[in-house]
Image: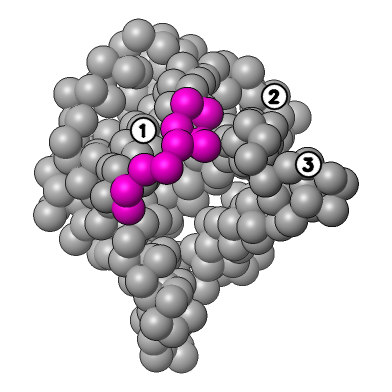
């Protein structure tokens, strides 16, 4: 019952469809990797420089906490920008990086606080018990997409994401949840692998590997988040039908764009 799916209740993201979403996200992120990767490159470089400068400093707990907040804030902006970019690509539209980032900065504080809330709820849930962490991961999967696509505020975006997730928890966990777990597990083992090959603990190479891994997986994670969000809206709310008339004028509806991606 924790996953919010009663037996007999209709699932808007059954396992087969969740796996198809993963396949579509892999194809999209592979074909449009560099445009998606470049959107987050500057924030990742800024964070890498910040960590590299302070890596060997003996700073207080609160200073490191502040650096962590800066990192999560930057990551939230990158996540929002790349999810919005993936959403545009799923609709067959070309990317305009300046316009995308302008839209992100217009929602700066909403994205910042929503990122901190989501991340700390997930981490706290995982520390206390694994299941609550996975629950928060699932119900807040769509928060960045909802903020950017539907232009909702902080509280409304959290409620909207939860509403979309109910009835599709297993599919969300199978897709975005599994991707998140794999990324975190690999990130956990990166420093241990570097230790095994003899990289010193104080070496900045460790920072480059850790941040580099986070940057490389952003295009796939964002493409998957946008794809799952689109699928649930289409199945739950008839989103694709709502855009049927506009697709007659626009050569790319979401459905047609997906067909283009899969070829």
In the depicted view, which residue is nearer to us: 119 or 166?
Answer: 119
Q: Estimate the x, y position of residue 219 in percent, counting from the top left.
A: 57, 33
Distance Cα–Cα, label 1 vs label 3: 27 Å
At 34% from the left edge and 18% from the top edge, which residue is drawn? 100
In the depicted view, which residue is nearer to us: 148 or 232?
Answer: 148
Please rate how many residues cluster around mark 3, counting C-alpha atoms within 10 Å: few if below 14, some from 14 to 19, many from 20: some
At 44% from the left edge and 21% from the top edge, which residue is drawn? 46
Q: Is residue 32 magenta?
A: no
Prevalent SS, magenta region: loop
Q: Estimate the x, y position of residue 145 in percent, counting from the top left.
A: 34, 41
Q: Estimate the x, y position of residue 4 in percent, counting from the top left.
A: 37, 81
The single residue placed furthest to the right in the displayed view is: 197
Residue 30, image quadrant: top right
At 38% from the left edge and 66% from the top edge, which residue is drawn? 122
Residue 110, image quadrant: top left
The residue wearing badge 2 is: 31
- N-term mark: 2 or 3: 2
Q: Is residue 55 magenta?
A: yes
Label placed on residue 74:
1
Q: Which residues are magenta?
A: 52-61
């Amino acid at each position: 019952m924790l996953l919010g799916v009663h037996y007999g209740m209709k699932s808007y993201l059954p396992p087969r469809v969740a796996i198809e979403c993963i396949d579509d996200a892999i194809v999209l992120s592979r074909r449009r990797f560099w445009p998606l990767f470049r959107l987050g490159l500057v924030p990742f470089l800024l964070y890498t420089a910040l960590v590299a400068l302070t890596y060997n400093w003996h700073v207080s707990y609160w200073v490191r906490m502040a650096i962590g907040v800066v990192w999560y804030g930057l990551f939230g902006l990158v996540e929002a920008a790349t999810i919005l970019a993936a959403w545009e690509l799923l609709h067959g539209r070309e990317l305009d990086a300046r316009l995308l980032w302008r839209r992100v900065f217009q929602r700066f504080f909403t994205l910042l606080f929503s990122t901190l809330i989501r991340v700390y709820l997930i981490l706290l849930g995982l520390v206390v018990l694994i299941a609550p962490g996975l629950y928060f991961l699932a119900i807040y999967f769509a928060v960045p997409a909802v903020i950017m696509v539907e232009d909702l505020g902080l509280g409304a975006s959290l409620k909207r994401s939860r509403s979309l997730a109910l009835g599709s928890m297993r599919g969300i966990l199978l897709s975005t949840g599994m991707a998140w777990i794999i990324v975190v597990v690999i990130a956990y083992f990166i420093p241990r692998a570097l230790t095994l090959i003899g990289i010193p603990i104080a070496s900045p190479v460790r920072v480059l590997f850790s941040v580099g891994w986070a940057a490389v997986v952003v295009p796939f994670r964002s493409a998957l988040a946008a794809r799952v969000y689109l699928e649930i809206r289409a199945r739950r709310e008839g989103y694709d039908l709502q855009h049927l008339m506009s697709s007659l004028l626009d050569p790319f509806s979401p459905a047609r764009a997906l067909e283009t991606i899969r070829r």
